[in-house]
Amino acid sequence: MDEFQEILQDFLIESFELLEQLDQDLVELETNPEDLELLNRIFRVAHTIKGASSFLNFDVLTHLTHHMEDVLNKARHGELSLTSDIMDVVLESIDLMKAILFNVRDNGNDSGVEVDACVARLDVISTGGDIAAAEPAAAEPTPEPVAEVPVEPEEEMNYDDMSEDDIEAEIMRLLNEKQEEDKAKRKAKIAAGEEVPMMPGMEEAAASEAEPTPEPTPEPEAAPVAPPPPPPPPAAVAKPKTEPKAAAPAAKRAPTTVEQTIRVDVKRLDHLMNLIGELVLGKNRLIKINDDVEERYEGEEFLEELNQVVSIVSLVTTDLQIAVMKTRMLPIGKVFNKFPRMIRDLSRELGKKIELEISGEETELDKSIVEEIGDPLVHIIRNSCDHGVESIEDRLASGKSETGVIALKAYNEGNHIVIQITDDGKGLDTDMLKNKSLEKGIITEKEADTMSDKEAFALIFKPGFSTAAQVTNVSGRGVGMDVVKTNIEKLNGIIDIESEVGVGTTIKLKIPLTLAIIQALLVGVQEEYYAIPLASVLETVRISKDEIYTVENRSVMRLREEVLALVHIGDIFEVERVFDSSEHAYVVVLGLAESKIGLIVDSLVGQEEIVIKSLGEYLKGIEGIAGATIRGDGGVTLIVDVAALMHMAKTVKSTISAEVEASSEANVEKTKASDYVVMVVDDSKTDRTIMRTSLRELGITLVEATDGQEALNILKQGEYRFDAMLIDIEMPRMDGYTLATEIKKYNKYKNLPLIAVTSRAGKSDRMRGVESGMIEYITKPYSPDYLRNVVSRNIKFKAELAS
Amino acid sequence: MSGKLQDIINKQNTLHNSEDQLEDIVQLVGFIVGEEEYSIPILNIQEIIKPIDWTRVPQTPAYVLGVFNLRGSVIPLIDLRTRFGLTPRKHTDETRFIVMKNDDEVAGFVIDRLTEAIRLKKSDIGPAPETAFQDKSLIEGVGKQEDKILTILKVNKLLERDF
């Protein structure tokens, strides 16, 4: 049973690999129906699957593939020319074949898929009939197929009737076939994998030299045992080529000698990646310790050795990390492969002529990203077909060629991969986009007026937005582009749209290469640190506080030509802001998918390689936090979830401007004299009593402190909201000047009136007082009236409240 | 000679008997939070460490102090004083983090001080006092000792997120 399972697994893996190639080949075949090589390849796929499935007793699958094979065989021998209509049937049968294979994978059997209708149509084609006529005739199937099945013993093997020798021979044949496939697959892997840099060269060589060469019989097992290193040019030349795209498949059957690949369970690679993550953390730690040691034992001899070891370890760790990352990389061609077929179907469905140009399909990406990127691309391409490329008439009317071109391109850019989808269609009309959004209530009129072109383009990603006048099969429900946005956000990617009316649209997806170990920007707020994935950081700017404007309760700043919404990291993460002495702030400009935001932080610490660790079951799902990492000093730093942060920024109450208003607010709600609170700071009880007596008449609340330290503590506790403070200068523990300086460090006390009450009346004393932030200077002795006047002026006392 | 043999046999028998008794004994670790003594089963304790630095995590209740690094793992830190509704207090020399585990869940808990390891007969453990919110109760049972009563906590409840 287990053995059977194993064979089944191999069969499935092999079949799906074959199918991937098949789709592309079929579409190509339609444009080049004469291409024998292509036909042969497709025929072999059907044949291989048929052979294997009959072994595994998948009768339905065998039945279907058998009839496919008939049609393809005829086409191959020139007895049948492949028209679009015939292709439709062939493609349909391939879809059915896929459905059956999925069934086999999920349920272990091949039943549940209805193939008879399709088989009947295939039969009609293979017997030379007209499919149009076949539709109604399907009910009374032509007798031929029934007769045909038994007369083709070498195609539909009947093992019961075979002699033992025949079976032996058949097994040998199948084994050879299998080996052939294996070799081809290995070659394909090598071509797509390690030898990627060689590909362009091969393509050219192949494209230029091979075009006219007729197909030599592909006999890999007969190929001579060639030395491994220099095979490419001769190997590629032997294969006829239609276009560079087919480079990989062409290399597939090139001779190969040594076993070069093994299949590895993804789980093992994941585990390996986790271990590397730990190693990277260890490396960071080591570097940090090395720095500390260097500082402490400067000039010692052992330092040099330590330095060497640390550099070697960190170098090797980095290399190791890259090497393991590479093992997880897959060419993006795996995703791109399904699009030619999709475009073909769509263009037929929409009655447009669309050509797809693919380039850079050998660009590699982490496996997990490759899996996520498929859906967004499907939606973007559907959109380009439906809304981007115009109908044939419209195109001709606007002086374009009748065939629309959609170009799909992938390339590397630093630590990112960029996938670019360009169409030469009608482009995005910003006015139309704004009007549609207004109609659907997605934006307000005011927003529409102030919107830049880029912002208007981004409207297509809003859920519920659709420009299609009516919902078609293809698109128009207003969900697809939202899916694009969500998926790209999940990958920490960035979406950029450029469009010109009448010329076309380009959508760029910028995606980080890997997800597990990332570069991060470390930022500080008060005494806390946060790590922001560098993939989402567009730039950082230092601004002065008065460059921050408030528009409708939102903080914004002008960044070159754009208006950028701002949010303070402290507001998002509830950081208690005790002190804020700097006139400057740093703004980290974050970009994710199509949106941008400025995040205000207190300081920028630097860039570090971090490993994302989960916060565990107990703390999972905290909004705005993607995880944690361990820093070089052994501390834990939280990682910002940029997507969630952008979402939170919309609702979070901003305190950037509130800070300034806080003091004025305090004055508003005084309704009785005792609402006014003044602190008296003096070490002499007599002096305190004198002040208390002098101020009693006002009826305000007095709080006493005996020295600077105590005063500061009372202030910090925040029990009272002080309107003013009377401060003695000469005090134990902390004197008046120091106290004033300390108080002014706190942002929220910036406007708190501090009044010095002292017997030191020298000019320099007054100067010091002003420097430390005192605004009034009362010299002892003073008259009660004078004190009252100064105090009530400073607390803006309303006379009618006096008791 | 036979007397000696008898002695050994007797000794072995008593040992055997005490092993039997062992099965009915629960081993607990006692600690103080505020004024009261609590305990948890020793098998739920991964380790006990002296206080180390932690990192605050936003949007959590006050009793979640944050997360800390325990030899490469990021582990939540919960203050039992605040969890039990007491005012938080500065850490002293006696403050400890007890790292508790239950299945795969691990978290550190701040306690005021450790007392002792306690062996308690199962028969000396009574049920938790009836409360209105039996489901939410953190108390597994009450252990009776000669001179005092000991509250035994439910580790799985302590490790359960309730926000």
Image (cartoon, coloured by chain):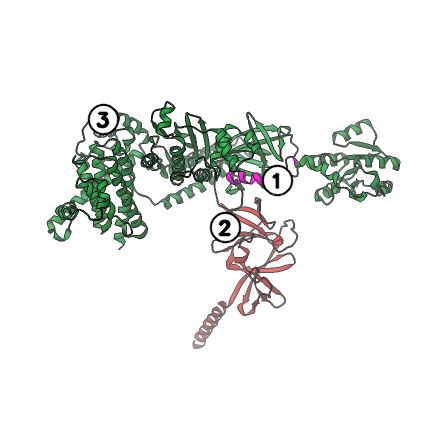
Q: How crowded is mark 3: few (under 14 residues within 10 Å), some or many (20 or more)?
A: some
Kind of element beneath mark 1 = loop
Q: Residue furthest top?
A: A399
Which one is earlier in the sequence, the residue at label 2 or at label 1?
Answer: 2
Residue under the image location 50 percent in, 50 percent down: A617
Query: Which residue position holds label 2?
Result: A617
Q: Position of residue A109 (x, y in %)?
A: 28, 52
Say whether residue A644 is magenta: yes
Does the rendering let one see residue B119?
yes
Q: In this view, does A138 lie to the left or right of B38?
A: left
Please state the extent of the stretch shown in magenta in the rendering.
A639-657
Which one is earlier in the sequence, the residue at label 1 or at label 3?
Answer: 3
Q: Which residue lies furthest to the bottom in this view?
A: B2
In 3D space, how far apart are the residues under numbered discs 1 and 3 (Cα atoms)?
66 Å
A617 or A356, nearer to the observer: A356
Kind of element beneath mark 2 = helix
Q: Are marks 2 and 1 on the same chain?
A: yes
A385 or A709, nearer to the observer: A385
Q: What residue type is labelled 1?
A: Lys
Question: What's the colour of chain B in the image?
Answer: red
Q: Is residue A636 left or right of residue A671?
A: left
Question: What's the colour of chain A in the image?
Answer: green
- Which image quarter: residue A443? top right
Residue A653 tag number? 1
Q: Do labels 3 and 2 share a chain?
A: yes
Query: Quarter holding the C terminus of chain A?
Result: top right
Query: Which residue position holds label 3?
Result: A211
A188 or B36, nearer to the observer: A188
